[in-house]
Amino acid sequence: MTQTVGPAGEKPQPQSAGPVQLDAEHTCDSLQPMLEGYAAQGIETVTCLDQLAPSEATSEPSLPNGAAASDDAPEEAPLSAAPKCSVAMGQWYFTRLDACGSARLTYDVVDTRTKKKIGGATFTAKQEITLQAKSGSWKTDDSLKLDSAWGAAKGLRAAWKTECSSGSACGASSGWSGAQAIAVGKTLYGGTTHKWKAGQNTQGFQAKTTVTITGAGQILLSPATFQPPGKMTIRCDKIASGSSTGCVFPSFTPTLMLPLQNRGQVNVAWSMQTLTDHWGWEGKGSPLTREMDEAVIKANRGKVCDSAWTADPTVPEDSCDEFPFAATNQSGAQLNLSGKDCAQIRPDTPAGGRWTVTYVNDATGRRCTIGHVPNKENGSVGGSLSLFYQNQRVLNDEKFWLAVGV
């Protein structure tokens, strides 16, 4: 029996990590009970930073009479430095190595004697976090735009600092030098750089950012401090690939992308489509997980590629190409299967533009595959898997998906 084989799997997409939320300890709402105390000290005005609610943040808020606003509509486009993810206002999005978020901030100026708001401003803050899989360094790209200002919100200056939630993970870094002047319609651009201190084999932490706005002669009581949700915990390690260090967002399950250009890749695509578990197919089957123990990997390969497989003289440099991979916990050997339990197929060169496989045995109800694949093409898939483990810092037992030719 012969069957045609097409692409398998799904392209990875950025995921939502949830809303951008400011530290709730200090908000403008908590300012009111303290106003009399500040007035008694002779402090006439105080200021605070807060965040517009998501419903308010999707459009420019109405401004008091005499307020100045930017000629440009607040930007809704993705960060220019973040091609991998798009930004919905007030939300975080992330991939394995990249994340970005945005928020609308409000700056309120309050008279401590009358307890009335006498000025205010609105800002759009954006941040991209870029991790490095092959070093312990990572960075942020940041921007802060003054959308509007009115009343006593004058002479505004802004500072930006990002640090690690755990001080043992990395040092703090400023987005730009000191507090910079900012005017309506203008944007401050900057970035921070960080280095994982690598005090342990693996460490999880979050990026924590503080935005400080000050007006002429005004005292800021609550800066805007935010850190991404738990889904965006950063994990750095020095065990995924030898002794090298690197960092990822482990909550994002990575996908090994393969072309559909040789018989080893066809073996994978057919197996994803046909085996009962649909191994590696996100949304349709079960994920694969990494096996790091070389002795176990060798045993996996020997148990599946056993006497049930014999070389096919029609396949040049024929080799036993097993799926799921020997370097996964889903290898047939770890499912207590051997070669006789696996589907056995021979991927063939394209006929009429389509790859095909020929069945060597009955493939019905199988959970593993052994394919007759030229040794070089077999090795190309194994090499891609090895590089994928390194480039995505996949640890032992960690999940991943597959996509072939999509």
Image (cartoon, helix red, strand yellow):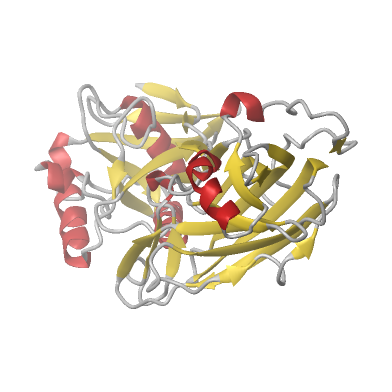
Q: Residue at x 66, y 44 (%)?
A: 110
Q: What is the x, y in percent for residue 377?
A: 45, 52
Q: What is the x, y in percent for residue 336?
A: 9, 43
Most distant residue in the left direction:
336
Q: Residue at x 21, y 32 (%)?
A: 367
Q: Is residue 194 above or below residue 39?
A: below
Quarter of the image where one finds residue 393: bottom left
Foreground pick, 391 / 269:
391
Q: Residue at x 68, y 62 (%)?
A: 159
Foreground pick, 47 / 340:
47
Q: What is the x, y in percent for residue 294?
A: 22, 66
Instruction: Please state if 117 lies on the left or on the right of 353 as rendered.
Output: right
Could you tell me if residue 129 is visible in this image?
no
Quarter of the image where one finds residue 352: top right
Q: Quadrant of the N terminus?
A: top left
Q: What is the x, y in percent for residue 235?
A: 38, 60
Could you tell me if residue 79 is visible in this image?
yes
Foreground pick, 142 / 26:
26
Most distant residue in the front direction:
40
Count of numbered labels shown in the rendering: 0
Instruction: Please state if 365 lies on the left or on the right of 11 as rendered.
Output: left
Instruction: Please state if 384 lies on the left or on the right of 295 as rendered.
Output: right
Q: Quadrant of the C terminus?
A: top right
Q: Is residue 5 above or below residue 289?
A: above
Foreground pick, 299 / 200:
200
